[in-house]
Amino acid sequence: MNQNPMSEPIFADGASDRSRHLSASGNAAGPGLATAAAPLAETPSTHPLTGPGSLPEEHPARRAAVDGGVADASLLQELRGVRSDTPSVWFMRQAGRSLPEYRALREGTTMLDSCVRPDMAAEITLQPVRRHGVDAGIFFSDIVVPARLAGLGVEIRPGVGPVFDHPVRTEADIEALPPLGDDYEEALAPVREAVRLTVAELGTTPLIGFAGAPFTVASYMVEGGPSRDHLRTRALMRSRPDLWERLATWVAELSGRFLRAQVLAGASAVQLFDSWVGALGQEQYLEHVQAHSAAALAHVSDLPVPRIHFGVGAAHLLLPMLGAGATAMGVDHRLRLDRALEVLPAGTPVQGNIDPAVLFTSEEARFAEARGVLEAGAAAAGHVVNLGHGVPPDTDPQVLTDLVAFLHSQRVARAAEAPEA
Ligand code: CP3
């Protein structure tokens, strides 16, 4: 079976998606850098809602801006390796506590309840787009929303993060995970509805859908909550690789179907967050994680939408993460983009990576950092500006608005002409 029936190449030079994955594995990397790409995992489910390979007729990515769609939006073009003169920007965690309108709307509703109320999720997604004029919305949800929709007991404790009622550590715990059948597909209805409401309002601004990668989500499940070093998760991986395999397979299906639901309902790009994967070495990543991230991404790889993959402290994993089936790499602020580009295959679009710390410095320092990031990304086939990690909750929102205006006032230096075609 062809697991990756890409109907439309999403790269400007027309290289097939599949050959990109292979080129990620064939790249001459620096010393000690793992280059292997997993064979793309079998898509573990059928997708009952549509046939593979095409976006629904009414999807915004099927229309250009003149017809109210996003097909030619510069942010998506950058992700496809087609450069624009003006930088495109969005911020991870642009929705949320830094915005007073968010805090007002959330009053009296728990975080996860607000995610499954379509009108609320849509409104919260739109707030930062209206206020800051960013070039994309990021769907307001959380990496543990799919687990909640599948029936697991999980909440988000303010100032703490996701906490599971029952940590998943033993064979019996894994056996007790709910099957991800039609019930789960139905449970995703509020997600689809929220995305539909959101894209109707966003118009010519694209919506980015997202999910948590298997390692990061499974880590919350195994630890029961946030953890500094993910010791239990990493121990499970080594001591009971069979159990880890079953858990990660389940999470890949959970997250993958969440991603697909968002894309079919109107998201025009996706980001797979593997926030805590930096805790792993290359060998552990390749042996125990890459194939599962690939399985999650394979749920949307037949659809013509860019796939961004992001991890924190994951400079040593850039290539294997790309090899999991991403088409663009998010880079955190610890690694300069020009250094990332030395490792990544030519033609790989990048996203990042303004240090969130500069949000708490002077405007001069912020703009200097932003200029530096634009310069470092100038040689990339495509570059979407972002922070190196999420917006901290105590950020002054005006600082973000001003940063977006500054970025939009800049011209991208054409250090290298975009793709070799
Ligand atoms: O604007 C956006 O980025 C969209 C929404 C979004 C949220 N979570 C909303 C949220 C996204 C993309 C996420 C992803 C997410 N969730 C990740 C990956 C990104 C990253 O930051 O690395 C992770 C690791 C989580 C798990 C999680 N959820 C954490 C660590 C926290 C913070 C806990 C805290 O209070 O400090 C959450 C809660 C959360 N998710 C909030 C928001 C807006 C804050 C909760 C609130 O407002 O009450």
Image (cartoon, rainbow, N blue to C red):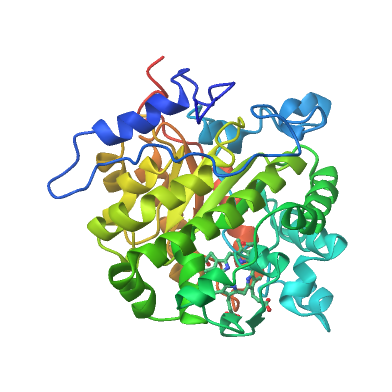
Residue 352 appears in the rendering: no
Residue 41 location, x and y as percent? 44, 41
Q: Quadrant of residue 353?
A: bottom left
Instruction: Name which residue lies at 12% across and 46% down.
Output: 31
Residue 113 location, x and y as percent? 78, 73
Q: Quadrant of residue 343?
A: top left
Instruction: Name which residue lies at 79% across and 71% down.
Output: 114
Nearer-the-camera pick, 335 or 213: 213
Farthest left residue in view: 31
Which quadrant of the figure shows ligand 1? Answer: bottom right
Instruction: Name which residue lies at 70% across and 47% down.
Output: 262
Residue 333 location, x and y as percent? 38, 60
Quick check: 205 left or right of 82?
A: right
Quick check: 261 left or right of 320?
A: right
Q: Quadrant of residue 183?
A: bottom right
Nearer-the-camera pick, 116 or 1: 1
Nearer-the-camera pick, 72 or 272: 272
Picture layout, residue 150 above or below residue 236? above
Instruction: Name which residue lies at 74% across and 26% down.
Output: 62
Count the marks.
0
Picture layout, residue 140 above or below residue 43? below
Residue 237 appears in the rendering: yes
Q: Which part of the image, by quadrant, shows the C terminus?
A: top left
Residue 282 location, x and y as percent? 25, 56
Nearer-the-camera pick, 232 or 264: 232
Quick check: 259 left or right of 234?
A: right
